């Protein structure tokens, strides 16, 4: 995979070269020397976007029904009210 870096000016002057480079790997487009955008082929974009899971998918526990959980009681009496003096 080849990584190409172009300035915004280079990108604007030759977008067809940037598109060709994106077929070989990501193209970083810089603004004032700092990366600002990334150009990917649609195939690469679909590959990386499908590989990611959302936070909801990461936190979901579909197997939670099978987990047996019986917490122990910490005390037999209800807690006493707090006294502020």
Image: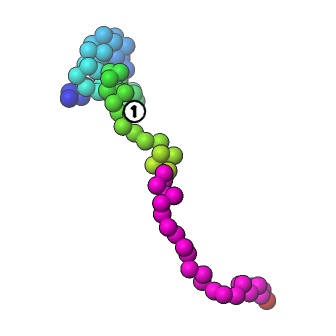
The residue lying toward the viewer, choosing from 38 and 70, is 70
Q: Which residues are magenta?
A: 61-84
**Pointer 1 residue:** 49
Q: Position of residue 9 (x, y in %)?
A: 36, 17
Using the rendered image of the protein, determine whether residue 6 is visible from the camera's viewpoint: no
| 61 sits to left or right of 2 | right
The residue lying toward the viewer, choosing from 11 and 42, is 42
Which quadrant is the N terminus positioned in? top left
**Residue 29 highlighted magenta (yes or no):** no
| 73 sits to left or right of 85 | left
The residue lying toward the viewer, choosing from 9 and 43, is 43
| 56 sits to left or right of 38 | right
Residue at the image position 39 percent from the left and 33 percent from the top: 49
Check the image and report above or below for 34 versus 9: below
Q: Position of residue 35 (x, y in %)?
A: 36, 32
Other residues around mark 1 within 10 Å, as few (<14) / some (14–19) / many (≥20): few
Residue 38 placement: quadrant: top left
Prevailing secondary structure of the magenta residues: loop
Residue at the image position 25 percent from the left and 26 percent from the top: 25
Check disc 1 and report its element: helix, strand or loop: helix
Which quadrant is the C terminus positioned in? bottom right
């Amino acid at each position: 995979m080849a990584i190409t870096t172009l300035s915004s000016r280079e990108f604007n002057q030759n977008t067809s070269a940037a598109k060709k480079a994106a077929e070989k790997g990501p193209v970083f487009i810089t603004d004032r020397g700092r990366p600002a955008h990334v150009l990917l082929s649609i195939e690469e974009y679909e590959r990386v976007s499908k590989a990611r899971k959302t936070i909801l998918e990461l936190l979901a526990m579909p197997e939670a029904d099978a987990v047996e959980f019986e917490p122990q009681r910490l005390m037999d009496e209800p807690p006493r009210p707090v006294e502020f003096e």
